[in-house]
Amino acid sequence: MSSDDSQTRKRAAPIRRLSGALIDLIAAGEVVERPASVVKELVENALDADSSRIRVEIRNGGQDWISVADDGWGMSPADARLSLERHATSKIFATDDLTRIATYGFRGEALAAIASVSRFWLRSRPREAPEATELRVEAGTIQSQRAVGGPPGTRIEVSDLFSGIPARRKFLKTATTEWGHISDWLARAALSLPSIHFDVQRDDRPAFSWPATDDPLDRIAAVISEADAAAFTPVSREAGRVTLTGFVSRPERHRSTAAGIYLYVNRRPVRDRVLQHALVEIYRDLLPRGRFPAAVLFLDIPPELVDVNVHPTKWEVRFADPRAIHQLVRHGVRDAVSARRWLAVDGPPAAAKDAAKDESTSQATLARDGGSSDWVFAEGVDPADSATAQLAMDSPGFRFEDFRASEGGRAVAPRVRFADLRLLGQLLSTYLVLETKEQLLLIDQHAGHERVLFERLRAEWLERAVESQRLLIAATLRVEPAPLAALIESREAVERLGFDFEHYGDATVAIRAVPALLAGRDPAQLVRNLAEELAAAGAAADALRAGSRSLEAADRVFASLACHSARRKGDALSPQEQRALLDAMDAIPWAPCCPHGRPVAVPIELAEIERRFSRR
């Protein structure tokens, strides 16, 4: 047979209806990715059934056996049988219900899909019924149904998952890996609903027991850790009918990945870029590069303003107004972090967990009193301006002076100033030593000066007011081809940054002016570093040329210039220079790290000093 004949036969194949078994397998492929998907669907059904206790049992990572039992409403014999049919559900009735989904499960295909790829056993009893119904299912077909005794609620057992589909089963990972996915989802569910008691067994041994509690911090301590719960500070903000609550970590506690971020929309665990970006953006100037905060955040939003029907596994959502949601989360997290002190210069901090609890009822008091934030060490704009400005600059007709006058750029009054603390002197020509009532405070002079220069360059750039200082004698240098090309291509923006240079046609550049902030540094080295940074970070060069509408990229240039211009480790500073640095740090928005992530200030508690000397 020729290839043309083969193609003709393929095109001429008739259209057929798929068999019910094949339809179930296709649905299972969408809903049941792995054992964790089964646990997720069964637990969500238990939650929708108004359960107060849920017990989950797992064997061999869920590949051999999964059991989920609850004390919820239960099902009648007819409902139990109907629940195994595709697109059968008690949670939606009309088209409009799809725009107001307020339950965890709603597609009406989970049980049918799971039963089609496993050996399935169900026992369910309504709370008012005298007996339960038991169903046994093989590969989607009901094998038996009978009345049995049993407690109110529903218990479902799933065994030999994908046993009839070897191609699917072989793609499952090790039992340990599959258990990791299961335990991760159970932790997310438990954090969302502290009022539900969870018992979890793995391979016939207790794994987790999370008793019901009315204190979300207690559930966080049980599910994540006591240390994480102690490092959280509460979040609370409203915008119309949308509410944000939860907890975020203080800046001194951070992680190498985003695994400690738990996000929820209407108590449903989600992975959402809008929410995560808004959260992480606030910490960009507070944490070392490559580090992430921890958070447990709950967004409560009217169902018609969010689409949870984006993906079969319901991990993703789509907001009607993502920009407004981004702004709400950003401001809520900013206010939470700015309401807490992590340097505690007025005295030793209270037990972190108790403080977090207290703050949940005293946010208004903190707001009236100006808060107790390390950001409030200095007058100036709110340090979260980095996030707010970036979004504001994306809007048409943006003017920085308008932004400065807006809520996001309001000035804050100082509460504690570095210059008000007793300066003991310089240690190892590297650290400034300050004394408070209850601690010593060490200031890294390079990190502190770098932060000062970075913030000043950044602010002047945004205000288009970088002051330039002419050199008495032009400095010359030779630049490699790629950095030279980047420098010339960004000439207009570089001149806006306070530099003035002339290219002589070969690899030589004559420097005639530098930013006044950086005067006193080697102008040739400054321009070389700038050219190399522009060449290495194309996005930063583009941001500068575009007027810094992408502030995060342009920050790399400011950070590089600040780093190479700041006073170095080993530089002996006179008492006047030490005081000048503290005054300068008081004049910028406070952040605990330099732009490259090194700590600016580190406290040493008096209690620790006394312990070392056996005074405690």
Image (cartoon, rainbow, N blue to C red):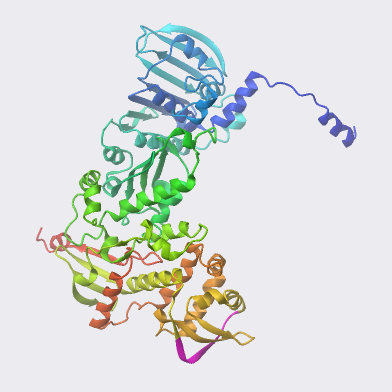
Q: In the displayed orientation, state which residue is furthest to the left.
A: 615
Q: Residue at x 41, y 59 (%)?
A: 284
Report the predominant secondary structure element of the magenta stretch: strand
478 falls in the magenta region = yes
The magenta stretch spans which residues? 470-480
Residue extending farthest to the right is: 2
Q: Quadrant of residue 383?
A: bottom left
Asked if residue 496 shows in the view, the reply is: yes
At 35% across and 50% down in the image, what residue appears?
333
Q: Is residue 450 left or right of 365 when viewed as pictured?
A: right
* Residue in front for this viewpoint, 210 or 345: 345
Residue 145, given in percent of the width and then of the height, sits at: 49, 8
Count of residue discs: 0
Q: Hey, which quadrant is residue 374 in on the image?
A: bottom left
Horizontal placement of 575 versus 21: left or right? Answer: left
Residue 515: x percent and y percent? 44, 80
- Left or right: residue 310 compared with residue 470: right
**Viewport quadrant of the N terminus:** top right
Residue 352 visible in this rendered orientation of the protein: no
Quarter of the image that includes the C terminus? bottom left
Tell me: residue 388, above or below residue 100.
below
Residue 227 is inside the magenta segment:
no
Q: Position of residue 28 (x, y in %)?
A: 57, 27
Residue 384 vs residue 604, the one in the foreground = 384
Q: Position of residue 45 (x, y in %)?
A: 44, 24
Residue at (49% x, 77% y) in the render:
529
- Side (left or right) of 612 relative to 360: left
Is 124 drawn above or below residue 572 in the view shown?
above
